[in-house]
Amino acid sequence: MRRDWLPAREPHLPGRNRRPADEGVSRIARKAPRPTDPQAWRDNEAYLAGLRLYANGYYWEAHEVWEPVWMNASPNSQERELTQGLIQLANAALKLKMAQPAAAGRLAAIAEKHFREAALGAATIVMGVDLSVLVERSNAFASCLERKAGAATPIIPLIGEG
């Protein structure tokens, strides 16, 4: 599987377009290692594909490939909280794209809670993500949604990407 893979079609919007017949998302999701090793995140194809999918507006697909990364993470770990938050953030972005701002706001608040939990741990960078910046960005996103102001989907702050 190429590391720069993205689906060739448009992003899936449940109830608005057909669920993808392409098995690419499922194939990548199955590549999630067991267990999720937070130190080996650069080799975790499912995790990296989720980041790429999210960054390119494929929120449903990102959620699908992050699910096994989350399920394979150690209970009560920073990486488990981070990936659960990423899944909820992708869900929030998807709901916003589907013009469901109330649902997006609810999910964004859940994502922020998971990021705050992850930030309570010893590491400040987990799986390449700067948790303090992610908490700040997700808080701003959730606040904008709560105020019914224009909200831009937050960029996930990976180390080395500014």
Image: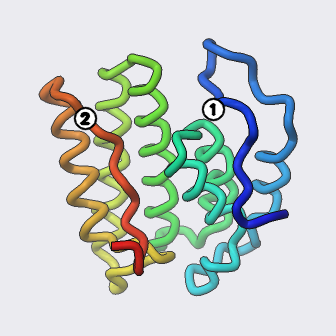
Residue under the image location 32 percent in, 70 percent down: 131
Name of the residue lying farthest toward the left:
147
Q: Position of residue 159 (x, y in %)?
A: 41, 78
Whichever of labels 2 and 1 marks the residue nearer the N terminus, that label is 1
The way the protein has been coloured in the rendering is rainbow
Residue under the image location 54 percent in, 46 percent down: 56
Residue under the image location 36 percent in, 84 percent down: 123
Against 47, residue 160 (above or below) is below
Label for residue 69? none
Residue under the image location 60 percent in, 49 percent down: 53
Q: Is residue 130 left or right of residue 87?
A: left
Front position in the image: 10 or 36: 10
The amino acid at mark 2 is Ala
Q: Is there CB contact under 8 Å for labels 2 and 1?
A: no
- Quarter of the image for residue 136 reads bottom left
Label for residue 11? 1
The amino acid at mark 1 is Pro
The image quadrant where one finds the N terminus is bottom right
**Callout count:** 2
| Residue at image mark 2 | 151
Q: Position of residue 118 (x, y in %)?
A: 36, 68
Q: Position of residue 85 (x, y in %)?
A: 43, 53
Q: Is residue 57 left or right of residue 121?
A: right
At mark 2, the secondary structure is loop
Front position in the image: 65 or 114: 65
Q: Is residue 29 left or right of residue 51?
A: right
Front position in the image: 106 or 133: 133
